Amino acid sequence: MKTPFTDADTEIAERNGTRLVRVTPRHDGDHRAWFTANAEALRSAMYEHAAVMVKGSGLVEQAELADLAEEIGGATLEYNERSTPRSRVTGKVYTSTEYPADQSIPQHNESAYSENWPHNVFFFCALAAQTGGETPVADSGAVLEKLPADLVRRFEDKGVLYTRTYRTGMGLSWQEGFQSDDKGHVENYCAEHGIRTEWDGDVLRTRQRRPAVTVHPVTGKKVWFNQAHLFHVEALPQAVREGLLEICGEDGLPRNAYYGDGSPIGAEEIETIQGAYAETTLAEPWRTGDLLMIDNILTSHGRRPFTGDRKVLVAMTQRKA
Ligand SMILES: O=C(O)CCC(=O)C(=O)O
């Protein structure tokens, strides 16, 4: 470990290029003092290993998650330009994505479809599920290395075109997606962020082109950083996919992804990407009170299905200058 932790036991879990550092603090009850003393070590462990889980963090208050995230990461961010349902808990602390317990959430770098993605993501387990419910991580550089060079080259050259149709009752409405009831506000936001818009009454279609691969500004590491495999219609279970295509047509799907020039991404390419994630994903069980922190460029996250009640909160931050 380049920057050693003080008053802590550390172990490193590893799977095919993904590493997660488990840190168990040893202190006399003052968890905030422990975090302050270890802030630099936690930051550098995220650069070195990408994912860090502090077991038994001592956090109890929901608002404290934002304070800790600001101390270790940077300024906390609002969840704007949403693609999944989350609720604000307090300030800039949100629930993690509220999808049904029996579903998995595929690995993704948070908001990689947007220009406004967070640099760090902090997940706090306020209540661990009875079974399952892990938040798996996968190293974005390891995913890139697993992918065939010709596929990476195509994606790198063309980027990804994300298409969305916001309508009430099917996926997110534009009001929820953009957190505003004002079409003018949405238009301005989209114009500022290179998003093309098309209105049909209260239905909004958007198209935005983003890179598929990026380079970490601090470590210089080149990584796979996009959500093509999650937006693509092939990511849906067959029955849902067929139903949606029948009702909305390809142009009206709540979400879809193409190559940046508008040409189709094949189903087998999506399968190859899903396979690279599957090979590199590491799932650490949650215990109530654990805190997972990741560098959002270097590490993707997802969610495993679960039973029982589960509450995971999230705070997203910029990078400390
Ligand atoms: O609930 C979790 O563990 C993570 C869910 C997720 O992928 C997200 O909120 O982006």
Image (cartoon, helix red, strand yellow):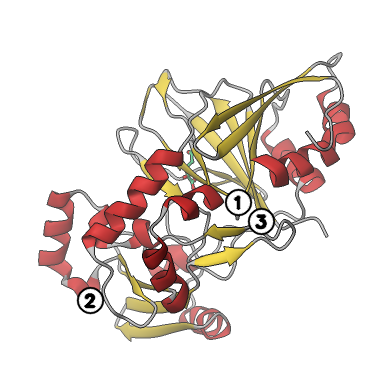
In the rendering, at what x and y percent does residue 127 appear? 53, 24
Q: Which mark is residue 251?
A: 2
Binning the other alpha carbons within 10 Å of mark 2 as few (below 14), some (14 to 19) or many (20 upward) gives few
Would the CB of label 3 be found within 8 Å of ligand 1? Answer: no
- Per the image, label 3 sits on a secondary structure element best described as loop
Q: Quarter holding the N terminus?
A: top right
Q: Nearer the viewer, residue 76 or 180?
A: 76
Q: Earlier in the sequence, mark 3 or mark 2?
A: 3
Which residue is drawn at the image coordinates 71% and 54% (left, top)?
76
Quadrant for residue 52, please give it: top right
Residue receiving disc 3: 119
**How many badges with numbers are in the image?**
3
Q: Which residue is mark 1?
A: 298
Residue lying at the far top of the rendered structure: 28
The amino acid type found where label 2 is placed reads: Asp
- For marks 1 and 3, give the CA distance: 9 Å
Measured in 3D between alpha carbons, the distance from the residue under mark 3 to the one under mark 2, in whole angstroms, is 32 Å
User: Where is 222 relative to 28, above or below?
Assistant: below
Disc 1 residue type (three-letter): Leu
Residue 164 visible from this viewpoint? no
Residue 287 in sight here: yes
Sequence-earlier tag: 1 or 2: 2
Observer-nearest residue: 109 or 127? 109
Residue occupying image coordinates x 43% and y 51%: 85
Query: Residue 313: percent from the left, percent from the top?
Result: 57, 38
Secondary structure beneath label 1: loop
- Residue 311 badge: none
Contact (CB < 8 A) between labels 1 and 2?
no
Query: Can you name the residue that lies furthest to the front here?
Result: 149
Does ligand 1 reach within 8 Å of label 2's beta carbon? no
For the point 32% across and 81% down, which residue is it?
Answer: 262
Query: Which mark is in front, 1 or 2?
Result: 1
